[in-house]
Structure formats: C-alpha cells, structure tokens
Image (tube, rainbow, N blue to C red):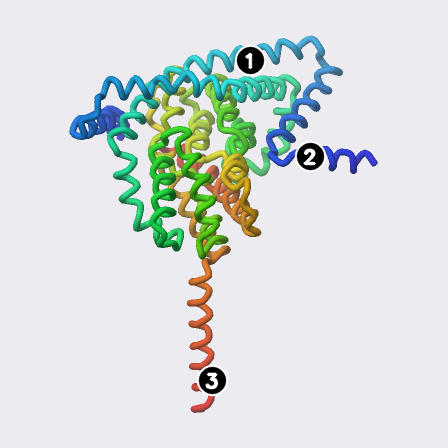
Amino acid sequence: MNYFLALLVPVLFLLSFLFALRKKVKLFDCFTDGVKGAIPLIVSIFPYIATVAMLTKLFEVSGMEAALSKWLSPLFSFTGIPDEITPLLLVKPLSGSGAISVLSDILSRYGVDSYAARCACVAYGSSETIFYIGAVYFAGIKRKKLSLALAIAVFSYLASVILCCFLCRFM
Amino acid sequence: MLLIGILRFLAAYIYPMNALFAIVFIISNAILLFLDPESFLPALLDGAQKAATLCLSLVATYSVWLGLMEVWKRSGVTRVVSRFLKPIAKRLFKTEDPETLDCVCMNLSVNLLGVSGAATPYGIRSAQLLDRSEEGEYASCMLFVLNATSIQLIPTSIIGIRVALGSAMPADIIAPTLITTVFSTVLGVILTRLLIPPKSAKRKRRALSFSRKRLKARGAGVR
C-alpha cells in the first residue's frame, strides 16, 4: 500500500512531462518559470507565518494552550480528536499560511510520525481557509443564504476532522 | 459599559483573524506580565526564528511543485481537467451559460490540482458571474461550499514539510487526506442541496405535492 503511494509522485511527474512533451512545451524554460514564482510566494506569506508563529509561541508559554486543551478535552475525547491539534483546528479556517506554522510546530513537538502529527497533517490537507475564501470571493456579493452556506462549510469541516482522526488510527 | 465597549471592539473586526489575534495576544501578554515577564520577548523571537526556518524549507517545497504546476498550466492539463468537469458543473450550478461554466470549471480544476493561488482569480470571477445567473442564491452558496470544503487531490505542501522534518513515510497521509476531502465535499454538497434548494427543484417538489394532493382528493371522491 505504502509502496504504491510512494510511486504516485514520480509517476505523476513522468506522465505530466510526457504529456507536456507531446504538446511541444519547452520543459526547462517552463519549469524554471514556475520555480521563479516560489520566492515571491514565500515573501507574500512570510508575514502571516511569522506573526502566527509568534502568537502560537505566546499562546503556549503563557499556559493558555494547556488551559484551553484541558477545557475542550472532554468534547474532544468524546469525538476522538487528539487535543494536541486544538490550535491548528482554530487557526486553519482563518489563515492558511498561519496554519502552516502551527502545523510545523505540532510536527516538531510531538514527532513527525506520531498519531497527533498525522491527524494534524490530514486535517490541514483536507480543509480550506473557510473564512478567508468567504471574505475574498464574496466581498461584493450580498446573498442572504451565504451565512447558511458558511455554517454548512464549518459543519462539514468539523465532521471531516472527526473522520480524519478516526482514519489516522489505522491508516 | 465595559461589555458594550468590548462588543464594539469586536464588531470593528469583520475578518475574525484580527479578533482572534488581538484576544489571544493581549490575554497571553497579560498572563505573562504577572507570571513570567522575562519569557515574553524570547517567546516572540523564538516564534519568528521558527517561522524563518520553516519558510526556507517551504521555498524548496514550492520550487518543486510550482515548477510542475507551470508545466500543467502550459501544457493544458488544467484545461483538459476542466473539460471533464463541465457536465458535473452544469448539474451542480444549474446554469447553461458557457462563459460562467468555463470560469467555474477552471476554478474547480485548478483547485483539484492544487495550483496555488491560481484558483482565487477564477473564484472571484465565478462568484460574480454566478451571482447574475438565474439560480444566483443557490449557485453562489454551492460555489462557496465547494471552495471552502477543499477538493485538492494531492496535499503537496504537507508532503514537503514532512520530508523536511525527516518523516519515515511522508506520503502515508495521502490516502486518509483524499478520503477526508471527498467526504467533506460530498457532505457539503448534499447539505447545500437540502438546505438551500435551487428554485427548479422547489418548483418540481411543489408540482409533485400538488399532484399528490389531487390524487388524494380524487381518492377521497371515489370513497
């Protein structure tokens, strides 16, 4: 199973490059053009990553994180969510790049291959920045039921987190 | 009085990240002021330090995937995927307008392939176009739910971070992520269909209940 998953990425690259060759795309020029975008992208998300990283460190040092986890833990143990990933669940719907710094904090604190870390990775990868999308896409649009749609999105997010923690137990 | 002040302060923030930041920062700050004022600045610096290291490893990750994504864009993979999505989009958004469909399909296919940042311009344009369509209310909500429940197929940046932190099996989260993503999207779509039904479905349902009533009335008459 894991061997096949490891095959996925190289096969993806091979197929994409062969397809691109058939379409007569200049591969080297094109690839470097894409890589060029990496630095501006990082520059544009660095402020968010750095700010949220400082905030999570404060959150941890001040003991608020322990207090919040303790407060939420009955709810979380009922649904099977490990309380180590609480900060990630709070930040992800708001800010994607902020959530990256919370995620890497969880990974280095509890070990990359630990149960909590894997839950965090799946929860991060299977969700979107709900509030950010709402703010950006629908800035000028006034539809009454968009708030209901927001509730639906948040509900699906929470349900999917419960499912992901369940799946991480044996996958 | 204080309560009203706090409420006003919160209402000033529309995007909740501002409120979250202010609340968490100020409370943590106050706690540290009393308990351990010396650890305040080291905590901030340590956070920023971690962010800097993380960004360096992210440059590596994004270099790899942005290169591949540019190849996808240039060779038309995104366009091929979006052509496959057209029949689904027609049913999901209840629109026949070709310009709207093109835009929506590009938004969905770019989201599926995870071409970072490219989904936003298509998303904004789709939102405007769908708002004008006949099923505006329903279609706008559907677009929002589809975008907000994440439909990315391969979680590229996470695999990169896991590799950078020395994971033994960086790709083992692909399968659960895929299942979870599909689950949340399907759940979102079903809930949207049930709670924010399109007008045509409402009309159909009304017609159905009307004919049922007539049937009942006729049945009563026979009896």
The answer to whether residue A169 is seen in the rendering is no
Residue A69: x %, y % from top left: 60, 29
Q: Amino acid at mark 2?
A: Ala
Which disc number belongs to residue B12?
Answer: 2
Labelled pair 3, 1 in contact (Cβ < 8 Å): no
Which residue is depicted at the point 46% across and 20% down?
A107
Q: Amino acid at mark 1?
A: Ala
Residue reaching furthest bottom?
Answer: B222
Residue drawn at 30 percent across, 41 percent down: B82
| Residue denoted by label 1 | B48
Of circles 3 and 2, the one toward us is 2
**On residue B217, which mark appears?**
3
Which of the 4 quarters of the picture holds residue A41? Answer: top left
In this view, A18 is above or below B189: above
Q: Earlier in the sequence, mark 3 or mark 2?
A: 2
- How crowded pointer 2 is (Cα within 10 Å; few <14, some 14-19, many 20+) is rated as few
Whole-angstrom CA distance, mark 1 to mark 2, is 28 Å
Q: Dot 2 falls on which chain?
A: B
Q: Nearer the viewer, residue A41 or B171?
A: A41
**Local SS, label 3:** helix
Mark nearer the N terminus (1 vs 2)? 2
- Return the residue found at the far left: A22
Local SS, label 2 = loop
Residue A45's disc number:
none
Q: Label 3 amino acid? A: Ala
Cα–Cα span, label 3 and label 2: 57 Å
Q: Nearer the viewer, residue A55 or B90?
A: B90
* Residue at mark 1: chain: B
| SS for callout 1 | helix
